[in-house]
Image (cartoon, helix red, strand yellow):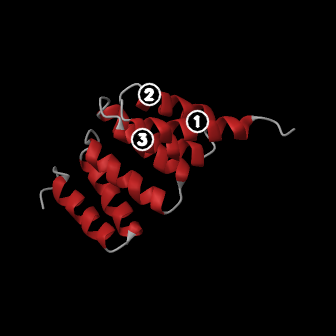
């Protein structure tokens, strides 16, 4: 395995994810990110591993890197919004949801993001 390429490491992460070994995915994902910090796929895989371990804040940060590196895609922004909401980062969750909504016209996706935004806003309101 060439130490300057992340693709073989990414294949190892996929192999571990197929077995549900999220610690293995994290280990190989971290190595892939170290080898190729500008590779959105490496960050995507690391984010998945962290999310599966319910490490929402860390998963959101990794997902934010995916979005930064591949800004035109709306799909990573959906997961970023959801991760930010789970991490209690409400204003950042709404920003990510708005950003995803601006990049898609899919009514199912828009409804999902509207629901997420409503949940976050409701959580922020004082009871009564």
- The mark lying in front, picked from 2 and 3, is 3
Residue 54 percent location from the top left of the image: 53, 59
Total labels drawn: 3
Residue at which label 3 appears: 108
Distance CA(mark 2)–CA(mark 3): 16 Å
Q: Is residue 49 left or right of residue 8?
A: right
Residue 47 percent location from the top left of the image: 40, 51
Residue at which label 2 appears: 99
Residue at the location (42% across, 32% down)? Answer: 100
Residue in front for this viewpoint, 28 or 64:
64
Per the image, label 3 sits on a secondary structure element best described as helix
Residue at the location (54% across, 42% down)? Answer: 84
Per the image, label 1 sits on a secondary structure element best described as helix
Where the C terminus falls, by quadrant? Answer: top right
Residue at which label 1 appears: 117
Q: Is residue 60 left or right of residue 41?
A: right
Q: Residues within 10 Å of mark 1 (few under 14, many from 20)?
A: many
Residue 52 percent location from the top left of the image: 46, 62
Q: Is residue 16 left or right of residue 77?
A: left
């Amino acid at each position: 395995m060439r130490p300057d390429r992340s693709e073989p490491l990414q294949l190892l992460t996929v192999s571990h994810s197929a077995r549900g070994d999220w610690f293995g995915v994290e280990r190989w994902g971290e190595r892939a990110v170290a080898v190729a910090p500008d590779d959105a796929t490496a960050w995507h895989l690391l984010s998945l591993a962290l999310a599966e371990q319910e490490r929402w804040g860390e998963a959101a940060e990794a997902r934010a890197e995916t979005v930064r590196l591949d800004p035109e895609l709306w799909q990573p922004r959906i997961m970023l919004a959801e991760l930010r909401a789970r991490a209690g980062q409400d204003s950042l969750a709404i920003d990510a949801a708005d950003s995803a909504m601006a990049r898609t016209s899919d009514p199912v996706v828009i409804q999902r993001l509207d629901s997420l935004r409503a949940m976050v806003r409701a959580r922020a309101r004082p009871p009564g």
